[in-house]
Structures are given as C-alpha cells and as structure tokens.
Image (cartoon, helix red, strand yellow):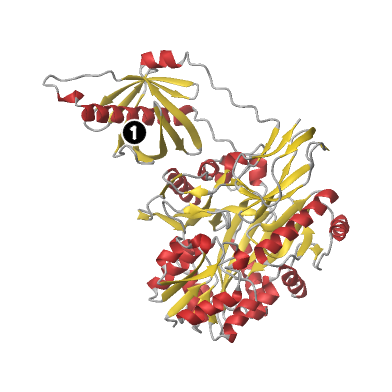
Amino acid sequence: MFDKILIANRGEIACRVIKTARRMGIKTVAVFSDADKDALHVEMADEAVHLGPPAAAQSYLLIDKIVAACKATGAQAVHPGYGFLSERAAFPEALAAAGVTFIGPNPKAIEAMGDKIESKKFANAAKVSTVPGYLGVIEDPAHAVTIADEIGYPVMIKASAGGGGKGMRIAYSADEVAEGFARAKSEAASSFGDDRVFVEKFIVDPRHIEIQVLGDKHGNVIYLGERECSIQRRNQKVIEEAPSPLLDEATRRKMGEQACALARAVGYDSAGTVEFVAGQDRSFFFLEMNTRLQVEHPVTEMITGIDLVEQMIRVAAGEKLSISQEDVKLNGWAVESRVYAEDPTRNFMPSTGRLVSYRPPAEGQTGDVTVRNDTGVYEGGEISIYYDPMIAKLVTHAPTRLEAIDAQARALDAFAIEGIRHNIPFLSALMAHDRWKSGRLSTGFIAEEFPEGFRPIAPEGETAHLMAAVAAAIDHKLNLRKRGISGQMRAAAPVTFETDRVVMLGDQRFDVSVEDMAYATVVRFGEGHHHEVSSGWRPGEPVWQGTIDGAEVALQVRPLLNGVALSHAGAATQARVYTKREAELAALMPEKVAADTGKFLLCPMPGLVKSIAVKEGQEVKAGEALCIVEAMKMENVLRAEKDATVAKVLAKEGDSLAVDAVIIEFK
C-alpha cells in the first residue's frame, strides 16, 4: 500500500480523497494555484505544492508540474479526482514514466472509453445499443449543420473530451447548431484543452441513468447499482439519487451486465461510470463512459456502504477486489443536492465573493437518517471566477425515497450561506415539488416545471402561519433581550410590556399575541388558532432550529429593520414585526419605486467579456446576440430582449465586470 499520495485536483473532491486517505493511514499532498493558496484542501493535506496562476491551463492542467510535485514530495501515487486531467491518457503515461502510480484506469481504457467519439465507435463495434449520431470529428459549423439535418432535430452538440455540462449544447434548428458548435468548441478548448465536438440525436423526454462499475487489475469487474441524474440544468446535474425510481430489478441487471461487458472489453481496472439515456418505457441507449470518479458517487456509497475512493486506491496498489457481485446489496435510498454559487433568480448566473457565513447542517446519523456534506469551502473563504461554482454536495440517506427526500428538505432548511447568491432556495423548492416526489422525471424537468425561471415561492397557508409564528417568537425574544440589556426589567415591581404584534409577510397581515409558557412560546393568531414554538435560537445565529407544535423545523434567518428575512421549504419572505401603532404608520409609508433599467444591458454575473457583437448606432432585433460573458468556465450569450438601437458600448473584450455593470446602453 502507498505511504503518500498526491491529489491532482482542488475543492470538495480533493477534500473527499484526503478524508479517505487519512482514514487509511496514507499521507497526502495537495496542489494549488494562486487563487487556491488559502483553500480548504490545502489546509487539510499533510503537504502542499504551488502550481502557478489561477487559470487551470496554467496550473491544474500542467502535467509536467504535477509530475515535478510528485518527485519533490515523494508521492508514490496520484488521484486525479474528476475534471482537469482525470480523463487524459497522457497523464497516467507521464506518471508511469516517472515511476508514479495513477489511481485510476489504465491509459488504454481511457483512450478507448474516455473519449466520447471513440467510446461510441467502440460501443457500436461491441453491439451495444447507442444513440444515433455522427461519430467523426466535425471541423466547421456548416458541416455540423449538414450532419444535424441528416440526423433530424433536436440534436446534442457535445465536446469529445467533455464532462460536467461543459462544451455541450442542444440545438433545435440549423442556426442553433451553428452557434452551439462555436460555443461548444470554445468551452471545450478552455475547459479540457481539446476542442473536438460531435453531434448526436437528442432523445425527447429522456431520463439520465448511469451504472457505477468497479474493476481491478486481475480481470474482475462488478457493478454497484445505478444512479438517476435526470434533474439537470444546462446539461449540468443538479440532483442525483440512488437507486432510480424508474428501474425494476430486471432492467437494473441488464444495464449492469452491459456496463460490465463494456468495461471488460477494454480491460477497465478502476471506478468508472457507464452512462445511459433511458426512455420512460425503460428502454436504454449507451451514451458514454466516464473513466473517473463521478461527482455524484456519494449516493452510491450511501446505498452500498462501499467507499469508492478506498477501492480505487486499493486497486491501483494491485489488490484484488474483495467484493463480488453477490456481495453488492442496495440498502435504502440516497439523495444528493449540488449546492452552487449561483443566483437562481437570474437564470442561475454564477455568483462570486466571500462566504461571510457558511453553516452547513450537522453531519451524522440520527435514527434511520444519515446526513453527509462533501465540501471544499469554509466560512470566510472566497468563491472565485476561475473554477466550477460548486460549494458543496449535500447527501441524505434513509430507508425509503420519500424519507430521504424529507431529510434532504430539512437539511437544506438548516444550510445557511451568506455573502454570495446560492441555489438552496431552488433546491428546497425542488424537494417540495409533487412531480419530483412522485418520481416522474426527465432531463427536461427543470425547463418544463420552471419555464419562466425560478422565483422564490411566497409563503401561503400553513407555511405562512409557521413563518409568521417564528418571526413573532424571534421578535419577542429580541425584545426580552433588549429590556434586559437596558435595565428596564430591574424595577422592584413586575414590569409588563405589550405582547400584541402585527406580522407582515409581504402584503399578508397576521395579528398575533405572544405569551411565554413554561414549555414553549405560544403565538396566538387573531383568527383563533395558535402555534407552540420552542427553540434554543440565539440572536445572530443564521439558522433557527426548534419545534413548532412538536414537529422539528428549521428556517434560515437574516436580520432586517423591524423584522427578519426567512427562508423555509423553498419559500422566502421578509417578515416585518410591528406594534399595532407601528403597523398603522408603516401602512402610510410610500413604496420605493425600482429604477428603470430597461435601456441598459447589465452584466448578470461577475465575469470576463469574451466578445462584443454590436457597435454604437447599430440596430438590433429581439433575440440577437449582443455579447458573450464567461464565468466559471461557462460562456453566456447575452441577447437583446426587444428591438432597439445601440447608443453606447460601455465595455470591451477582456474587461472583468461586476454584477449589474452596464455593458450596453440603448436609445
């Protein structure tokens, strides 16, 4: 077994590998760029080696620097994580030449299956069912359009060396093919150093199901069940689960056996994933094989009890698999949410900045429920523009699917992040969605259920009463604290103060009274019912956790003037708490009118201007591309919302812009 390994990656996956290595008694070496000098994975590792500037092409993608770091530290093996160099056959070849072991598949397997074009050719030759498409290299947009016309629309344009939704576009017309081809090639070059793309038929209303395989260097290959990753946005997975609510045991076995046959054919000898697109009728087609650890591997670990990173390390060290196919048992259900630094109310544009507050839910097992949080950040750390916007992967495991979903919803409510925008409200809304709960999934789920984008849900019904009760209880606690601090409660005679309040949730008004009892704080509503509220919450804590009428509840809390901002179960509101007189006066205050920004194109996220497509005085039509802004390895095309004439162009190619910076002014 190895004494020391180097992790050629960053963020949460580097931290994840370090945890397993530490448990196995193996020392670790981290690598880092200028942007990551204070990163969590650097702090966790036993040693760390600086690679270079923030851009991945000048740091994490430089094979010679990784090899040099191994030589300098005496690392005997390298775990590549996912992304970066994990699927580049040249990487394990260079390591082998330096006498360093690659914790992953052999280079021939990577070449055969890691390249999406070559893997499809190989699968066709092996009589594996594949999606119709053109497997040759496409040189220009005109060629891509010709191929798409022959296949039939819609089509998927994909980077050959891609992954993680980068270098991928769906096109429904010839114009979209031409533009998508250019964007996919550009993203592929910047993310993977390989700009080749291919075109295949896009299956309508599909489900994305993948099989986890595990092989060793002695010819043994097994599969560890499936994961469903159908909840996607921009071809990027958002929620994963294991097992899939679609599959029955017979289909699971067919997919697993096919995946293993494909892996054996290329001598696969590590953890890998065979991805399929499945129809609602359980028909399935081979998509690609990812010759690395997947982002969503924790859900498989939770239902099988198998540490995939440990197995990869043991296999790389030459050990035989200690697990046979008969040993693999699926236990319960696991759900994973990817927590991203992005603004779901602005079409999920990336968000950067400092994590002023980062308070994830407590990890561990309570009863039959387990909570796990894989992360690479910490409170006070910074989310930069250079890398993927993932903050954490929140995983819950329980005996049944609905129990795992309910546990995930509670964990999301207890997850507090401040300083940047994040997608937790959206994830919470998904957990409460009836279609998601019923398992009626497809990769078009988000586009179909949120066609106008995401807006925080306004609290209604019982949720509104719950949030009003918590707001009133918080206000009551703050009032008691203020009186204690000011000395108003120190009089010899008992002091009473008004406990009638008006809680405003936006335009909703609730007249309540608050009373402290020995067992709880009782919030009585004017219409007759009441809630018993109990919590150890203290002022300043970003999460309120307690019980309401005996049921456990968590809400995210942020202080406001005369109240608190609350988030719970996908609902968000600003709760203002007034005395009755204050409520009368507040009703007389004029409403603030938002500034008119209709004549400006604003930068929707912090990013780099890649190109400007218009000039001053130019007339543009609705839908016409105006500029391209790159953020976190994704290129975002900003388009005209209506016909207009360009008055001024206030940004230029190469500018780094803040959110809401003015790019173009219109007449």
Determine if residue 186 is in view: yes
Q: Quadrant of residue 485?
A: top left
Kind of residue at badge 1 = Asp
Measured as percent of width and height from the top left, residue 120 is found at 74, 69
**Residue 448 vertical placement versus 310 (above, below):** above
The residue located at (22%, 27%) in the rendering is: 486
Could you tell me which residue is drawn at 62 percent across and 82 percent down?
A: 93
Relative side of 472 to 608, left or right? left
Asked if 114 appears above or below 457 in the picture, the reply is below
At 78% from the left and 60% from the top, the residue drawn is: 200
Residue 345 figure quarter: top right
Q: Which residue position is annotated with label 1?
A: 549
Residue 284 in sight here: no
| In the foreground, 335 or 249 | 335
- Relative height, residue 312 to residue 558 (above, below): below
Left or right: 407 as drawn, with respect to 61 = left
Q: Could you classify mark 1 by the number of other residues whose Cα lies within 10 Å: few (under 14), some (14-19), or many (20 or more)?
A: some
